[in-house]
Image: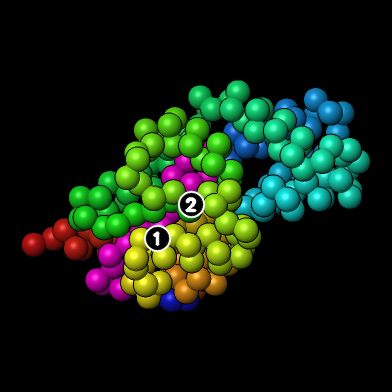
C-alpha cells in the first residue's frame, strides 16, 4: 500500500461508482439492452464484471451467452439504454464532499473513466461537473483501458504532475490496478468490500481536513 503524502497536489477521480452513483443504473440499462435481444444472464453477471472494459464484456457475452452483435452494435444499444436512464444517476455524497474540499485547497483534479466519452459527458452533465477546463480521460482517449495503466498515465502527463505526489480514487479492482500500475497511491471508496492494508476515501478526507486547519 502506497501511503498518502502530506504535500498532495493532485487527485485523479474515477467516475462510475465513485463520483457518480451510477453502477445501479449501468446494471439496469445493461439488462434492458440484453433482455431486448433475448439474452438470459445470471443475476450476478453485471456485478462480476464491475470495472471491466466494453470489449471484455462483449467478448464474454459472445462466448458464453450467444450475443450475435458485433462490438459497435452492442455498445450502441447499451449506451442508448443507459442514456434513457441518465436521470437516475446521482452523486456519491462522500466523494463530492472530498472533491469540493480539494477544490477549496486548490488541488489539481482530473477525471479518469473506463467508459466511452459519450457516457462520461452525460454523467458529468447530469452531476453538474461538465466544465471546459476540467481534464477528462475517457476510454476513447486511450488504446488500452483499465486495468492497463494507460488512462492514469495519460492523465498524469496532461496534468503535468508526478505519480509520486498524486492519488487516485477508485471503486473497482480494475481501476485500482490501473492506478497502481501508473505509480499512484489509491484510495478506495468507503462502500467497497474491505480488503487488508488499503487506503479509503475517508483517509484522504481526513488528510485534506488537516490541511485546512490553522
- Please give the label number shown on residue 137: 2
Tell me what residue is drawn at x 80 percent, y 25 percent.
Answer: 36
Q: For this view, does 97 lie left or right of residue 175?
A: left
| x and y percentages locating residue 185 in the rendered image | 43, 70
- Farthest residue to the left: give it: 214
From the viewer's side, name the closer residue of 2 and 182: 182
**Visible residue check, residue 200:** no
Marks 1 and 2 close (CB-CB < 8 Å):
yes
| x and y percentages locating residue 210 in the rendered image | 20, 63
How far apart in space, not on screen, are marks 1 and 2 (Cα)? Answer: 10 Å
Q: Is residue 19 above or below residue 85?
A: below
Is-magenta flag for residue 8? Answer: yes
- Please give the label number shown on residue 14: none
- Please give the label number shown on residue 158: 1
Magenta extent: 5-22
| x and y percentages locating residue 83 in the rendered image | 59, 27
Q: For this view, does 101 lie left or right of residue 47?
A: left
Is-magenta flag for residue 176? Answer: no
Say which element carries label 1: helix
Tell me what residue is drawn at x 48 percent, y 51 percent.
Answer: 137
Tell me what residue is drawn at x 24 percent, y 71 percent.
Answer: 7
Tell me what residue is drawn at x 65 percent, y 28 percent.
Answer: 80
Amino acid at each position: 500500500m502506497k501511503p498518502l503524502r502530506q504535500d498532495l497536489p493532485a487527485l485523479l477521480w474515477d467516475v462510475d461508482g465513485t463520483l457518480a452513483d451510477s453502477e445501479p443504473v449501468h446494471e439496469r440499462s445493461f439488462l434492458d439492452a440484453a433482455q431486448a435481444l433475448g439474452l438470459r444472464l445470471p443475476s450476478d453477471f453485471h456485478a462480476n464484471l464491475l470495472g471491466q472494459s466494453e470489449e471484455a464484456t462483449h467478448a464474454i457475452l459472445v462466448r458464453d451467452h450467444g450475443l450475435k452483435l458485433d462490438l459497435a452494435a452492442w455498445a450502441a444499444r447499451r449506451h442508448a439504454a443507459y442514456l434513457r436512464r441518465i436521470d437516475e444517476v446521482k452523486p456519491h455524497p462522500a466523494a463530492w464532499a472530498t472533491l469540493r474540499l480539494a477544490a477549496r485547497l486548490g488541488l489539481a483534479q482530473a477525471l479518469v473513466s473506463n467508459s466511452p466519452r459519450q457516457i462520461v459527458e452525460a454523467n458529468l452533465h447530469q452531476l453538474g461537473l461538465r466544465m471546459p477546463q476540467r481534464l477528462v480521460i475517457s476510454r476513447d482517449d486511450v488504446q488500452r483501458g483499465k486495468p492497463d495503466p494507460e488512462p492514469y498515465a495519460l492523465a498524469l502527463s496532461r496534468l503535468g504532475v508526478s505519480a509520486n505526489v498524486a492519488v487516485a480514487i477508485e471503486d473497482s479492482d480494475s481501476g485500482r490496478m490501473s492506478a497502481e500500475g501508473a505509480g499512484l497511491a489509491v484510495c478506495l471508496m468507503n462502500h467497497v468490500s474491505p480488503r487488508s492494508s488499503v487506503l479509503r476515501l475517508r483517509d484522504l478526507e481526513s488528510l485534506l481536513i488537516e490541511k485546512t486547519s490553522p
